[in-house]
Image (tube, rainbow, N blue to C red):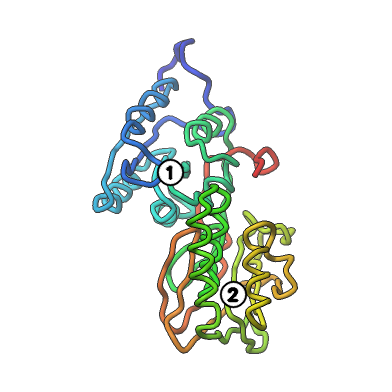
Amino acid sequence: MSAEPSPDYEPLTPHVRIERLRAVVNPMSGGVNAKATAELQALLGRYDLQAEVVEAKPAEIAEALKAAVDARPDVLAVLAGDGTIRAAGELCGPDGPLLAALPGGTMNMLPQALYGTTDWRKALGEALTGGVVRNVCGGVVDGHPFYCAAIVGHPALWAEAREALRERRLSAAMRHANVALRRAFSGRMRFYLDDGPTENAEAVAFLTPLISKALDEADALEAASLDPKGAVDAFRMAINAVVRDWRDDPAVDARPARHAVLSGRRPLPAILDGELTHLGRRAEVRFTPKAFRALAPRLESVKT
């Protein structure tokens, strides 16, 4: 930074010292267009900082993220999809650069939780002008990190129907709901939470303190077993997943947990922060108290 910033620059946040910023953009991500890189460079030019923006195609993303983190900037800004943002959070870790996880995907679970918006320009502007350091906790499923939610089991696909309806993609919502209902009873899972007894369910969801409405402290995950008893229960749960908080459904049992083991007769599908992932027949889930540090507004100022 220069000793005497130009009055033409917009003020940076007084809460965090920011001198160097690296940004990685995936122009092929669902929420990014061909002009995004140029727009991002122009936006960063409003601030008195050293900024470098790298555009990377999907095959180049992993290398670009690693190079950006290895450069040890104060902030790593990522404009890409949900999977890329999860990878960036894992690379930054608790001691690396602050992460500005910008909404450039389709579901944008983590960016919405941090910034309360799907407009990446607004998110980055508010982070740079008024952001603070936010410690983000999360979880890990067999080596796969998540920072908002993990849903293990075939009913995980209800989340796709819910997001499609929120975006008013009605045909996609119906398609996802039909797939979820067809697979709803394809195989129950056995699971246990912490040192508790072995139980059975169609699926188990794990919510982090970042988005959970039930956890008062950031010291565990909220684990919710989904156990519809038949087609009527499954249909009601699917509707609740679309129109309101599915944890209010009577077929959902929610409680805190720091560790879980799940197993099924077939490989288990899972949705991790909006990304579909295929696990093995046995999966282990653990709470991560401090996953990475984000540059984001204070929690109470974020409206979701």
Is residue 295 shown left or right of residue 249?
A: left
- The residues bearing labels 1 and 2 have C-alpha atoms spaced at a distance of 27 Å
Res 239 seen here: yes
Disc 1 target residue:
104
**Residue 215 screen position, x and y as percent:** 72, 61
**Residue 251 screen position, x and y as percent:** 71, 75
**Residue 128 screen position, x and y as percent:** 51, 30
Count residues near mark 1 (Cα–Cα under 10 Å), then give few for <14, some for 14-19, many for 20+.
Answer: many
Name the kind of residue labelled 1 in the image.
Gly
Q: Are marks 1 and 2 in contact (CB under 8 Å)?
A: no
**In the image, residue 297 above or below residue 106:** above
* Label disc, if present, on residue 36 of the rendered structure: none
Is residue 194 shown left or right of residue 23?
A: right
Disc 2 target residue:
204
Residue drawn at x 41%, y 23% as measured from the top left: 1
Nearest to the observer: residue 174 or residue 68: 174
Quarter of the figure that contains the C terminus: top right
**In the image, residue 117 above or below residue 229:** above
Q: Secondary structure at mark 2?
A: strand
